[in-house]
Image (tube, rainbow, N blue to C red):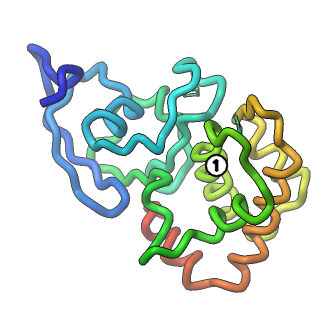
């Protein structure tokens, strides 16, 4: 068991991560982001500030974008989490990942997993968002490389792609827990 999970008082939790049910014994204080990176080994979810400011740690919890540094792992017990590792299917990038790739929506890539999951939440709710809606949606996610216009273009591109791939939209929504 990784050291971060050891402790006198632990709780058994079960979380379905990217479609796979995982059980673990964790301390009640363990943050979801640390559970994902250290217990589940999914390091695609990044840690920036740990104070809910940057959005680098954004994942979907039961279909809704959350900053996983503000959620305890025990609060996700019984829930469904999707991280960036859960998006591609059968070696094919998800439409949102394609959008970021094609529209140069990343530079260093540190904010990218959080931006992509945040976009996923938006496109689940609004199939064809306006530029203003996209900007408002990512307003809680910081890009230190300041590539915001390319990120907005990437989300727009993804919305057009998903309109042409309704099956992928449906599968992603189901996997995300909506
Ligand atoms: Fe969670 Fe910055 S690491 S918001
Ligand atoms: Fe570098 Fe956003 S691409 S922080």
Return the residue nearer the eye: 12 or 109: 109
Q: Residues within 10 Å of mark 1 (few under 14, many from 20)?
A: many
Q: Position of residue 95 (x, y in %)?
A: 64, 71
In the visual, does 60 lie left or right of 120?
Answer: left
Q: Position of residue 20 (x, y in %)?
A: 27, 60
Count of all numbered marks drawn on residues in the image: 1
Residue for point 88% across, 60% down: 130
Which quarter of the rendered picture does the N terminus lie within? top left
Relative vertical location of residue 161 with respect to residue 144 in this rendering, above or below: below
Q: Position of residue 131 (x, y in %)?
A: 90, 55
Relative vertical location of residue 89 with respect to residue 100 in this rendering, above or below: below
In the visual, does 114 lie left or right of 145?
Answer: left
Return the residue nearer the eye: 160 or 42: 42
Q: Is mark 1 within 8 Å of ligand 1?
A: no
Residue for point 42% across, 77% down: 90
Return the residue nearer the eye: 102 or 52: 102
Q: Quadrant of ligand 2?
A: top right
Query: Residue 5's image quarter?
Result: top left
Residue for point 67% across, 39% down: 108
Q: Residue furthest front?
A: 108
Query: Residue 74's image quarter?
Result: top left
Return the residue nearer the eye: 132 or 45: 45
Can you identify the residue that label 1 sits on? 118
Q: Mark 1 falls on what kind of element?
A: helix
Relative vertical location of residue 178 with respect to residue 5 in this rendering, above or below: below
Q: Residue furthest top?
A: 8
In the visual, does 92 lie left or right of 105?
Answer: left
Residue for point 53% across, 35% down: 57
Q: Position of residue 122 (x, y in %)?
A: 69, 56
């Amino acid at each position: 068991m990784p050291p971060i999970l050891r402790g006198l008082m632990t709780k058994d939790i079960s979380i379905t991560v990217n479609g796979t049910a995982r059980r673990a014994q964790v301390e009640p204080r363990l943050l979801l982001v640390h559970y994902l990176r250290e217990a589940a080994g999914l390091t695609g979810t990044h840690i920036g500030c740990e104070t809910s400011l940057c959005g680098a740690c954004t994942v979907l919890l039961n279909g809704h974008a959350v900053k996983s540094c503000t959620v305890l792992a025990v609060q996700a017990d019984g829930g469904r989490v999707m991280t960036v590792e859960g998006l591609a299917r059968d070696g094919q990038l998800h439409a949102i990942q394609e959008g970021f790739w094609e529209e140069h929506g990343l530079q260093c890539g540190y904010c990218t997993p959080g931006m992509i999951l945040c976009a996923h939440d938006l496109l689940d709710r609004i199939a064809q968002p306006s530029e203003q809606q996209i900007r408002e949606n990512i307003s809680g996610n910081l890009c230190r490389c300041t590539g915001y216009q390319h990120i907005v273009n990437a989300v727009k591109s993804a919305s057009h792609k998903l309109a042409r791939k309704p099956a992928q939209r449906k599968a992603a929504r189901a996997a995300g827990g909506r």
